[in-house]
């Protein structure tokens, strides 16, 4: 499994990440969601460079030319609800992609809220058989919800290639994915943070992405 951390090279992505992490900036949900979406766009563009391209003849009003193009075989799958603006960024780039949605969320299994389990209850997705499957979720903390999402989507068929995309990851989450992903899979992230607190939130992170995008939940 290959891991690509986009912030290992300086770019405008640094600005978006700084704003996402800034607790004052986070007070504007629209701007927060917009930066999540823009990171999705950048990551999707970088991911597009890894795909296979073949020349296709295109006819213009004045002639013809060959342009390298790739197949429209992408399935973009999202973990609800925090993944929605990130998903939109990917869909802006892969605008012919099919889409899948999985409801997977953490449930604390002890009174102290230090141990978590993952619950999945809904999935709407096309078959991934023989296709390029891109699963997007802004936060890769323990890796539990992503592993559950991968398991659910693989039931629709074996993909030709799997990409996992997140804004912030932890080393623990990345290691958890090594147990469920094939060797050729690629994990994309905009940052790898130092770890998690006792409640399994990424530190320094930027907080609960779903709440920051859409408001606090019960």
Image: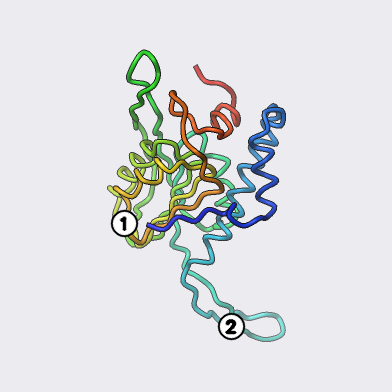
Residue closer to the observer: 99 or 85: 85
Q: Earlier in the sequence, mark 2 or mark 1?
A: 2
The kind of secondary structure element at disc 2 is: strand
The kind of secondary structure element at disc 1 is: loop
Please identify the residue farthest to the top as the structure is shown.
Answer: 111
Residue at image position (39%, 36%) is 142
The residue at which mark 2 appears reads as 66
Image height check: is 8 above or below 218?
A: below
Report x, y in % for residue 203: 52, 32
Using a 10 Å C-alpha cutoff, classify the residue at mark 2 as few (fewer than 14 neighbours), some (14 to 19) or many (20 or more): few
Residue 60 is drawn in which quadrant?
bottom right
Report x, y in % for residue 77: 44, 47
Residue at image position (64%, 48%) is 38
Please identify the residue farthest to the front as the structure is shown.
Answer: 194
Please identify the residue farthest to the bottom as the structure is shown.
Answer: 63
Image quarter hosting the N terminus? bottom left
Report x, y in % for residue 113: 40, 18
How many angstroms separate mark 2 from mark 1 (CA)?
34 Å
Circle 2 or circle 1, nearest the eye: 1
The residue at which mark 1 appears reads as 182
Residue at image position (29%, 48%) is 179
Report x, y in % for residue 30: 69, 34
Residue 143 is drawn in which quadrant?
top left
Image height check: is 26 above or below 88?
A: above
**In the drawing, what numbered circle is on residue 56?**
none
Image height check: is 5 above or below 24?
A: below
Residue at image position (31%, 56%) is 182
């Amino acid at each position: 499994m290959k891991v690509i951390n986009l912030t290992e090279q300086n770019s405008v992505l640094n600005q978006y990440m700084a704003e996402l992490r800034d607790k004052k900036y986070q007070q504007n949900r629209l701007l927060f969601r917009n930066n999540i979406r823009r990171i999705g766009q950048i990551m999707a563009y970088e991911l597009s460079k890894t795909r296979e391209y073949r020349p296709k003849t295109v006819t213009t009003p004045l002639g013809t030319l060959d342009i390298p193009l790739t197949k429209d075989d992408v399935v973009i799958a999202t973990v609800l609800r925090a993944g929605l603006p990130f998903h939109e960024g990917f869909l802006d780039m892969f605008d012919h992609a099919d889409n899948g949605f999985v409801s997977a969320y953490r449930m604390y299994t002890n009174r102290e809220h230090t141990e978590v389990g993952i619950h999945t209850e809904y999935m709407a997705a096309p078959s991934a058989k023989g296709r390029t499957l891109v699963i997007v979720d802004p936060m890769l903390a323990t890796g539990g919800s992503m592993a559950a999402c991968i398991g659910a989507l693989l039931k629709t068929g074996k993909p030709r290639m799997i990409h996992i995309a997140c804004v912030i990851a932890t080393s623990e989450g990345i290691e958890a994915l090594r147990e469920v992903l094939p060797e050729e899979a690629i994990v994309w992230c905009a940052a790898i943070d130092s770890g998690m607190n006792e409640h399994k939130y990424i530190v320094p992170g930027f907080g609960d992405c779903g709440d920051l995008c859409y408001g606090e939940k019960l």
